[in-house]
Image (tube, rainbow, N blue to C red):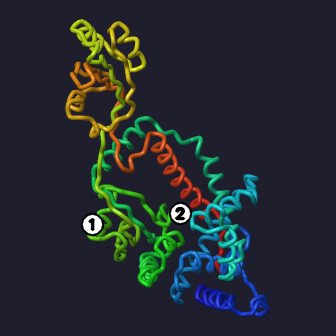
Amino acid sequence: MAFRLALTILAGIAMATATPTAYSQQVEGIAAVVNDEPITTLDVRNRMRLIISSSGVQPTEEMLTRIQDQAIRGLVDETLQLQQAREFELAVEEAEVDDAIADIAARSGATVEEVESDLAASGIDIQTLRQQVKAEIAWQILVSGRYRSRIRISDQQIETALDRYIQSASQPQYRLGEIFIEITPQGGEERAVGVIQTIYGQLRQGAPFQAVAQQFSDAASASAGGDTGYLPLSGINAQVAEAATQMEPGQISNPIRVPGGFQIIALIDRRDGQVIEQLNLAQITIPSSRLTDANRAALVRAAADINSCDALEEAVSGVEGAFVTNLGDVGANALVPTIRDALSGLEPVAATSVLDTAAGAQVFVLCDKALTGPGVPNAEQIENQLINQQLSLLSRRWLRDLRRDATIEIR
């Protein structure tokens, strides 16, 4: 039945280039039923056209069967998501869909009109894309509404994650594109091998990696076109890391067997790691023209008692000629060696000894310090990442439970 359906859909795709009369005469059937809600062969055919158009693949008969599986699986999931939206009386406004499509167009460097024109040229009804976008929006709202308030990220979790980022920032970093095909209980390893080999063949023929990843990859990075961002080798699967170290930017790997499935990677970029100590500093200065033994000694006493950067003006109020300058955040590597050495080993809040500089007698106060580097986020960004990771996991579990409890018939 699946093979006959694929041939029927293949004929339908071919007829997209035929006359409108011939196309409209095609009799539509039911491809699947989800909780008594039908998915038609027209729905599947339109989704297949969308996948083919957006991924840039040149479908062989074998590839078409894979695309059909992908289309039906996506439509089943979206039907379940929209059924949940109706159950919770959640309505996605058309304006929200318009904004999302405008964002898709902008990220592609196109206008909405150009997207619609390209879809029409491929025989794709714009409603196919709108339905997909509507399901995505509804599902994001449902998942956030159901789980967001339950997620608690502790300061310890943020600190631990920040420590990992800082450690990784000191290592060489690799920015990868990835396509992951999962070995599922239903399809087994044979199906996964077939899919990954077919996709690899398409990539070798010039299909855009980002578009193929977005349509076919089972990895969480699929929505970003497979882009993993910069990762240290310690954060990459061992087999994948071995392949990445032997690649040049722009190259695509052979299929790699990894836990749970198969993976193809593209090396987008790599960079050396770098960790910079960022210091938040203030300085207290007595200009050379006003420096005496008495106010120098007063500055030494005042510096020894400093325990707050908010009260520096008050701390030096008794030191004649002294004034405070807030230097803000300064990279330790940008400081002259004398000052850097004087600050070395200090913890906030603490002051250096009095230093003789070209400006006069100076004390540098360490108000705060942090390690940073390329790709190291701040605490708020880390918290959002941890929340999104948990939401993604809970989203997959919820959808899995919906599939398990639903009545799904593939015809």
Q: Which residue is denoted by mark 1 in the rendering?
A: 245
Q: Position of residue 396 (x, y in %)?
A: 54, 58
Instruction: Tell which of 285 and 411 is nearer to you.
Output: 285
Q: Position of residue 247 (x, y in %)?
A: 30, 71
Instruction: Tell which of 253 and 91 is nearer to you.
Output: 253
Q: Quadrant of the N terminus?
A: bottom right
**10 Å neighbourhood of mark 1: few (<14), some, or many (≥20)?**
few
Q: Residue at x 44, y 80 (%)?
A: 203
Q: Position of residue 141 (x, y in %)?
A: 65, 52
Q: Residue at x 54, y 51 (%)?
A: 391
Q: Secondary structure at mark 1?
A: loop
Q: Secondary structure at mark 2?
A: helix
Q: Quadrant of residue 94?
A: bottom right
> Eyeballing the image, is 186 above or below 10?
above
Among numbered discs 2 and 1, the one appearing first in the sequence: 2
Q: Residue at x 38, y 46 (%)?
A: 376
Q: CA distance from mark 2 to mark 1?
A: 25 Å
Q: Quadrant of residue 295?
A: top left
Q: Position of residue 228 (x, y in %)?
A: 42, 60
- Residue type at mark 1 is Thr
Q: Is 190 placed left or right of 100 in the picture?
A: left
Q: Which residue is denoted by mark 2 in the rendering?
A: 223
Q: Is 291 placed left or right of 1 in the picture?
A: left
* In the image, farthest residue toward the front: 289
Q: Quadrant of the C terminus?
A: bottom right
Q: Residue at x 42, y 45 (%)?
A: 377
- Residue type at mark 2 is Ser
